[in-house]
């Protein structure tokens, strides 16, 4: 491995010191007691709305190195997923700079749609717009800037990061237990294989963010569930958990694996009751 490759790997990954005894562990993610611990940790990224302010870990729990690293490598790709950006625009969720994403650009544009739902407005540049039987529209958007090729893994890492933060808020130092070490390794960039469940995207405004973490059932495919507007995601917390594609599709979910690639297009449906 060249020096440039080493530097790139270090920028995308942090080490977890799992050799430390429970009593010597400190940082929720890397477990190290070293370094500065000045920053608070938002369990859910701040750009997802005001309610996330209730889920904040005070300074002293997450080292500044992990806090900064996870903001770049996990939180940012998660909130900037194309479907998340679209939902943030419809929901009026403001980013850290104070404005929600109001324009959703796409490739191969054939139509510009100014969509307003429940007071939230967003402009869509669509590649295809088709009228459907109930008088609504089926819209295909081909992202101008596609999600990273490893977006499935990054999204799972984001859900697992939320799970670790939720565990600390619920159980305190018990969240440093060995049984969650596989999550720490993955969250901090170690390669892993897994799957993500996703419901079909809908143009929905709920003004609600729902996160459910089932720490007592880590093998459940819905052990970590995230729902905001038209985005619904879920992943197990146990290493090696399995789900069949048929089982997921039977209840209306799709299975995406870490071996898959980012979709080239996003489909959404506007019903006749949605003003456009």
Image: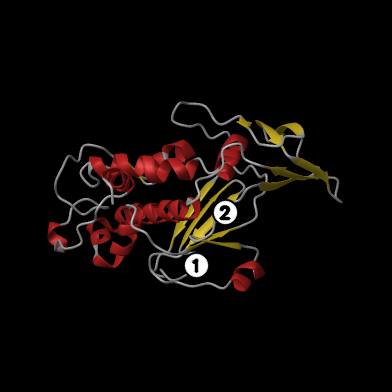
Residue 19: name its quadrant.
bottom left
Task: Tell me where residue 198 sits by quadrant.
Answer: bottom right
Q: Which residue is mark 1?
A: 221
Point out which mark residue 232 bears: 2
- Seen at 43% across and 40% down, the residue is 76
**x, y percentage for residue 25?**
17, 56
Front position in the image: 167 or 69: 69
**Residue 210 at x, y = what percent?**
51, 51
Residue at the image point whose x is 14% and y is 46% from the top: 34
Q: Nearer the viewer, residue 65 or 212?
A: 65
Residue count near mark 2 (Cα–Cα under 10 Å), binned few <14, some 14–19, many ≥20 = some
Q: Residue at x 46, y 57 (%)?
A: 212
Q: Judge whether 200 appears above or below 242 on screen.
A: above
Q: For numbered disc 1, what is the local secondary structure? A: loop
Asked whether the viewer can see residue 57, the reply is: no
Q: Quadrant of residue 53?
A: top left
């Amino acid at each position: 491995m060249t020096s440039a490759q080493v530097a790139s790997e270090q920028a995308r990954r942090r080490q977890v010191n799992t050799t430390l005894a429970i009593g010597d562990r400190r940082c929720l993610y890397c477990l190290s007691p070293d370094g500065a611990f000045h920053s608070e940790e938002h369990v859910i990224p701040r750009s997802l709305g005001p309610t996330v302010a209730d889920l904040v870990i005070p300074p002293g729990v997450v080292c500044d190195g992990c806090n900064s690293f996870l903001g770049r490598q996990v939180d940012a790709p998660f909130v900037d997923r194309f479907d998340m950006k679209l939902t943030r625009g419809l929901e009026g969720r403001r980013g850290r700079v104070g404005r929600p994403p109001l324009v959703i650009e796409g490739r191969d544009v054939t139509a510009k749609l100014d969509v307003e739902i429940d007071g939230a407005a967003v402009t869509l540049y669509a590649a295809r717009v088709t009228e459907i039987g109930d008088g609504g529209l089926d819209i295909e958007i081909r992202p101008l800037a596609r999600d990273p090729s490893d977006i499935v893994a990054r999204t799972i890492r984001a859900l697992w990061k939320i799970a670790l933060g939720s565990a600390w808020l619920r159980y305190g130092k018990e969240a440093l237990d060995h049984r969650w070490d596989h999550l720490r390794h993955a969250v901090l960039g170690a390669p892993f294989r897994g799957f993500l469940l996703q419901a079909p995207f809908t143009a929905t405004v709920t003004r609600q963010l729902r996160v459910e973490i089932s720490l007592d059932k880590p093998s459940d495919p819905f052990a970590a569930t995230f729902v905001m507007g038209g985005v619904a995601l879920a992943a197990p917390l146990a290493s090696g958990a399995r789900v069949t594609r048929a089982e997921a599709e039977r209840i209306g979910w799709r299975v995406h694996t870490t071996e898959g690639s980012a979709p080239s297009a996003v489909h959404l449906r506007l019903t006749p009751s949605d003003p456009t």
